[in-house]
Image: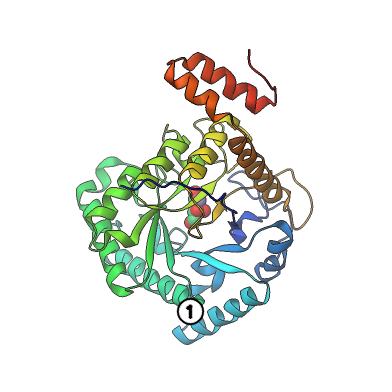
Amino acid sequence: MTSTTKDIPTKYRFSFGPWNISEGADPFGPDVRQAFPHEEKFALYQPLGFDGVQFHDDDVVPDLDGQSPAQMLAQAAQVKSMLANQGLVPEFVAPRLWFSPHTIDGAYTANAEEDRAYAWDRTKKSIDIARALDCKAIVLWLAREGSYARESKNAREAYIRLHDTVNAMLDYDREIEIWIEPKPNEPTDQAYVPTIGHAIALAYASSDPARVKGLIETAHALLAGLDPSDEMAFALAHDKLGSVHLNDQNGLKYDQDKNFGASNLRTAFNQVRVLEEAGYGSKGEFIGLDVKTFRTQQGCPVTAHLKNSRAIFLHLVEKVRTWNRDLERQCIAARDYEELELQVLRHLMGVGGVG
Ligand code: XUL
Ligand code: MN
């Protein structure tokens, strides 16, 4: 476990993925905005205050399954120079294991051996792409690892398969880190690895625990009925918070990817507080956003949600830094948590003073 004390305020750097600028389709309707080419998105990053790019493997190499190894590496090299030209760095590459006909029943935990073989092959390609970009982190969002009908899979065996996959990845490349992004449901009914506790257990059980961490998304923690700041604190205590996907979620429904703080401002404040107190970011970790604009939003490209979520994060950093720690200590010493709560709310509302 680690405890960090921090003297110099962290200067945060921000990242998002090209999928965060989307065309607005949902399960009930088609695109409502024109597609904006990925390669043109890179020019938007710096002006918006972002310098990290999160990638799915096929954000780097479109139609990845249809490309030869040489074509794949040539395309990755091209993206690498596009990033360099814009002063950007790749934060991570994530294998997209939920689109292919081979991943209908899951990927590493699919019942059919040929589907599991596809998943492993695709994972090696993702690692090769990351290496070609000089990127060290592979994110595993385990989209379809889980079940719709509990009896359809042997869950114990599924967890063993996930563990074996993590080890095989660590073996395949001795430098990568694996960041597991837990989510409790959607698209499956019941997902394996639903919380950061599950992810970190997998990390410790792996052949190289120092290279396996977690990525915590606010909305995913809320969907599990957990407090995202406590989830982050848990990972930080184990020095295993590889990255975050800050966003928000209004209750237990589909994964909303709302703007950071839009539904749960106090919860957002506490995430920033926990990150600040642990010195998160001082070793180069990104503040990653995974936010979606409203389907009603017009224009192309739409970027206000990214700018606004970043701005809210920075406002909350200010709120954390100006929070009266003496008052906090006094309230804690007197075990007067009613007063503590009142003062937090007043501080968030910008109402000065006491009482
Ligand atoms: C899905 C999700 C993904 C991952 C990356 O809910 O959050 O976008 O962040 O694969
Ligand atoms: Mn995410």
How is the protein colored in the picture? Answer: rainbow
Q: Is residue 284 left or right of residue 323?
A: left
Q: Which percent across, then down, holds residue 89?
A: 57, 69
Q: Which percent across, then down, holds residue 1?
A: 30, 47
Could one spot residue 97 in this view of the protein? yes
Q: Which residue is mark 1?
A: 132
Q: Is residue 315 left or right of residue 219?
A: right
Q: How many marks?
A: 1
| Residue at x-position 48% and y-position 59% | 283
Q: Secondary structure at mark 1?
A: helix
Query: Of 100 and 72, which appears nearest the observer?
Result: 72
Taking 19 as reference, is 83 above or below it? below
The furthest residue to the bottom? 70
Query: Of 217 and 153, which appears nearest the observer?
Result: 217
Which quarter of the figure has residue 84? bottom right
| Residue at x-position 51% and y-position 48% | 7
Query: Of 10 and 100, which appears nearest the observer?
Result: 10
Does mark 1 have its CB less than 8 Å from ligand 1?
A: no
Q: Which percent across, then down, holds residue 210?
A: 31, 60
Location of the C terminus by quadrant is top right
Q: Residues within 10 Å of mark 1 (few under 14, many from 20)?
A: some
Q: Is residue 14 left or right of residue 226?
A: right
Identity of the amino acid at label 1?
Answer: Ala
Could one spot residue 62 in this view of the protein? no
Taking 145 as reference, is 315 above or below it? above
Q: Which percent across, then down, holds residue 173?
A: 33, 74
| Residue at x-position 55% and y-position 45% | 246
| Residue at x-position 35% and y-position 69% | 118
